[in-house]
Amino acid sequence: MGRKFTVAVGALVALGLAAGGFYWMRARGEQALPLPDVVSPEPPGFEEGMLGNPPSTPVPAKPGTTTKTKKKAPPAAPALPLKSGEVLDYTADVAKLDNVATLTLKVRGQGSFLGKSVWHLQAAAHTLKPLRIVFELDDQFDSYSDARTLESLQYEMRLNERGQKVQSIQRMTTSGREPAAEAAEARVLPGTRDPLGMMQYLRTVDWSATREVTSPVYDGHKLYEVRAKLASGSVAVGVPAGDYRATKIALHVFENGVESKDAYFALYLANDAARTPVLLEAVMPIASARVALVKAGQENTQSSR
């Protein structure tokens, strides 16, 4: 397995889970924090279980009396095809090699963060033997995304690649205000999503009535524009988890207004209530890659912390 092959795997993981961020940071000399031995799954200020609590209804006061204004709970989130505790397990094939890596997407829970209702989204990637012998990778990503829009509030990367460990915690800002002590500032455009939030956002789109959506996406290092276009409303897809009818979405990536022409990406969403991502395809100059659903399950969110 040569360098081109390992680069292909890195590109695959970067597409699905943004794990390539470690190499981008190293290549550009960006500073990263050492990875601590124990990492809390939630940042300071995160309150679990707040999502969906409707604002309290005020009780009319009697004449001549005074009332204290109660603090309102975060507004209820709209009905999305996301559920706390959802676990999606994938296997990754690259070129002619099968099952070279495992990928997992989780909806860890819901809560309140920075005064907003959020989803805590998580992803993990691990390479397997024989690839692991030359490309050891164990990465984790956490996204705190607005419950209504899935716009990113904070994006975290904890990367362990070839024995080198780094941590990046970035809080999104459009104002340029001083960042919090526990996170670096990431200057982004309004409406920016991170890779995990973008993946989940595409599940919320009504593709029967929409042909294209566009969003700025920040991958932990650079800001891109992603245009997702409906390619087909119903295609047959076979993956280890089973056979599906799925909606095929073509993903076009732009940097500084110029589209990347040397790679092709496609996402397949099951035509069911959950709109589960069942397949992710990438065709690149050096290799093709396929990330296929192995199992969809549920974990106990009460023990996820």
Image (cartoon, rainbow, N blue to C red):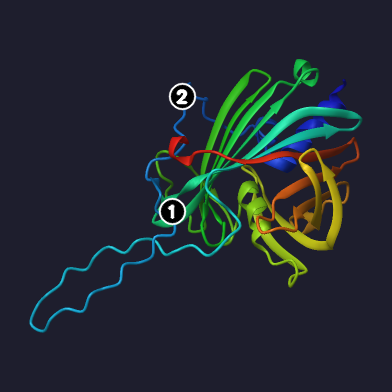
Looking at the image, which is closer to me, 173 or 149?
A: 149
- In this figure, which residue is indicated by the disc labeled 1? 177
Q: Quadrant of the N terminus?
A: top right
Q: Position of residue 123 (x, y in %)?
A: 61, 38
Residue 165's label in the rendered image is none
Q: Residues within 10 Å of mark 1 (few under 14, many from 20)?
A: few
Q: Is residue 158 visible?
A: yes
Q: Is residue 14 above or below residue 188?
A: above
Q: Residue furthest top?
A: 133
Q: Position of residue 165 (x, y in %)?
A: 59, 23
Q: Quadrant of residue 3?
A: top right
Q: Quadrant of the C terminus?
A: top left
Q: Of callouts 2 and 1, which one flags the residue occurring earlier in the amino acid sequence?
A: 2
Q: Amino acid at mark 1?
A: Arg
- In this figure, which residue is indicated by the disc labeled 2? 38
- For mark 1, give the secondary structure: loop
